[in-house]
Amino acid sequence: MDISDITPPLITSTLKAWRQLEEPPDNLLELEILRRDATSRVERGIRLRELIEGLVAAELDRQRRAEGLDTARPHPTRDDLLAAVARDFARNNAELEAWSALYHRYLVPVPLSVEDLSSAAHLDSRNFRRRVNNGAQQLAGELQRQELEEHRRHRHIQRGRHLPPPEFNRLFGVDIARRDLARQLRDESGPDFISIEGLGGIGKTALARAVAHDLAHDSDFDGIAWVSARQAWLNDQGIILDTPDAATSLADIVSRLAAQLGFAELAGLPVVEKLERLTLFLSRSRYLIIIDNLESVSDVALLVPALAPLARPARFLLTSRQTLSHFPIVTRFPVRPLSLEDSRALAESELVRHGRAAALRQEDMTALYDVIGGMPLALKLVVAQMGQWPLSVLLENLRNARRDAPEQLYSFIYRRAWLTLDDLARQLLLSLLPLAPDGEDIEWLRLMSFLPPKQFAAALVQLLDCSLLETAGQPHSPRYRLHRLTATFLQTEVLAGWDEDDG
């Protein structure tokens, strides 16, 4: 129902019909707030009456409490009701008078005439009717507010119906990134493609999901699509599980996008024809399209150019372990590790979730952070296992890749990246183990690598593309550093084992 159709005359007509035991107009039965709990016309009629009676009674009680009046309902006798009217109108409160007039005119169990009510209120009939109309106007405004909120809720559900549910109760350390990313996506002059980048397990998907749910509450986008290319995930027990039915190619992504945008009939058409139809549709609609775990797509080099015509006014948010900086239309949004403070907050939150005491000793948290370095996935995995193993054992396992869980953790985060590196990039990565925590400049990296300039440059690009190196400092003089977990990984025997396996 359109908000503007909820008018005081319609409210009055409905109340009069109820008072005279007649059928009210059908208009208010179309309210969205009724459809949530009732389906049939009879059910909606009952729900409407309950809603209006409850609203009027609640507002009348609220106004009476504000005036220090008793909110107990008087006995349904004519004299008691008229005495209540007299008390309400003695306070010279316009809102109280409006709600009281509406309530006593139409909703009390004993019918009262306008003349009797006017006399009790010490007004003439014309002025009392004016108070009744004011009450109908107040009620119409409250129904409009609730209906508008229901429309927003419904639009939020519609916009977010393709989003996966959050896998977290609360995110830590990403408030600034979350606001910044949402701001860029809302900005009509912002980038067409934004790529959230970082190591596996650093929280790219969680950030994208949180921002998408934030934007689903707004009216900035007509709809939101989410296509997942995630082929595996690591659970709390440290087991790598396959994700069924993940998108693995450009054709998969376009087909799923077409289905979510309401073009299921395009199934079976070539990718080019699907893209043409989607381009036409999206040129008239502002959609947010999210593609998660883009690095898992086999023909990722074709994907961004193929999707580029769909952008503007549509926007694309991508997540990837491998950088998309070589596409000029893509703006990078690197995800940084959590700080020590945020890591502790996350770890203690996870302890509570697993039913254990939340407190962590400072020295234990510092030792954990020295190994993991603010990696949310690794923090959650270690906390989940703290009920079975002492923290000292878990940290030793992480340092030496012993037991299944740490080895699976390293496999999940690093194996794919390691396999994409050539021998020179692997050599460069191993040579960076002595990197200071605050990082070193490019000259230090070149000297430690013992690689010729061209080979060094190519190897460095590979490490940056795979998010295996972090950059900090000013653009004209960046400093390069390893994530703590990457350094821990390089110190284990896993790397040597992978060398042998892959040789």
Image: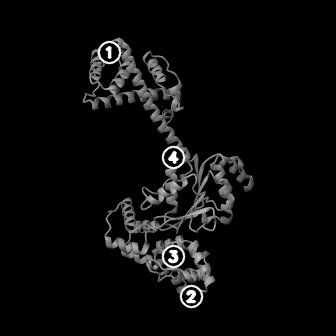
Q: Earlier in the sequence, mark 1 or mark 3?
A: 1
Q: Earlier in the sequence, mark 1 or mark 4?
A: 1
Query: Circle 1 is placed at which residue position?
Result: 123
Query: Circle 4 is placed at which residue position?
Result: 218
Q: CA distance from mark 1 to mark 4?
A: 47 Å
Q: Earlier in the sequence, mark 2 or mark 4?
A: 4
Furthest residue in direction front, as rendered: 476
Whether residues under marks 3 and 2 lie with C-beta atoms below 8 angstroms apart, the answer is no
In the image, 63: left or right of 225?
Answer: left
Q: Secondary structure at mark 3?
A: strand
Q: The residue under label 1 is which amino acid type?
A: Leu
Percent position of residue 445, x then y: 53, 82
Q: Quadrant of the N terminus?
A: top right
Mark closer to the observer (1, 2)? 1
Q: Earlier in the sequence, mark 4 or mark 3?
A: 4
In the image, 307: left or right of 481?
Answer: right
Q: Residue at x 33, y 28 (%)?
A: 60
Q: Quadrant of residue 374?
A: bottom left
Q: CA distance from mark 1 to mark 3?
A: 82 Å
Q: Quadrant of residue 305?
A: bottom right
Q: CA distance from mark 1 to mark 2?
A: 98 Å
Query: Circle 3 is placed at which residue position?
Result: 477
Q: CA distance from mark 4 to mark 3?
A: 40 Å
Q: The residue under label 3 is which amino acid type?
A: Ser
Percent position of residue 277, x then y: 71, 49
Disc 3 crowd rating (10 Å Cα; few below 14, some 14-19, many 20+) is few
Depth order, front residue of 484/137: 137
In the image, 435: left or right of 292?
Answer: left
- Location of residue 208 with respect to 491 vertically, above or below: above
Depth order, front residue of 279/447: 447
Query: Circle 2 is placed at which residue position?
Result: 450
Q: The residue under label 4 is which amino acid type?
A: Asp
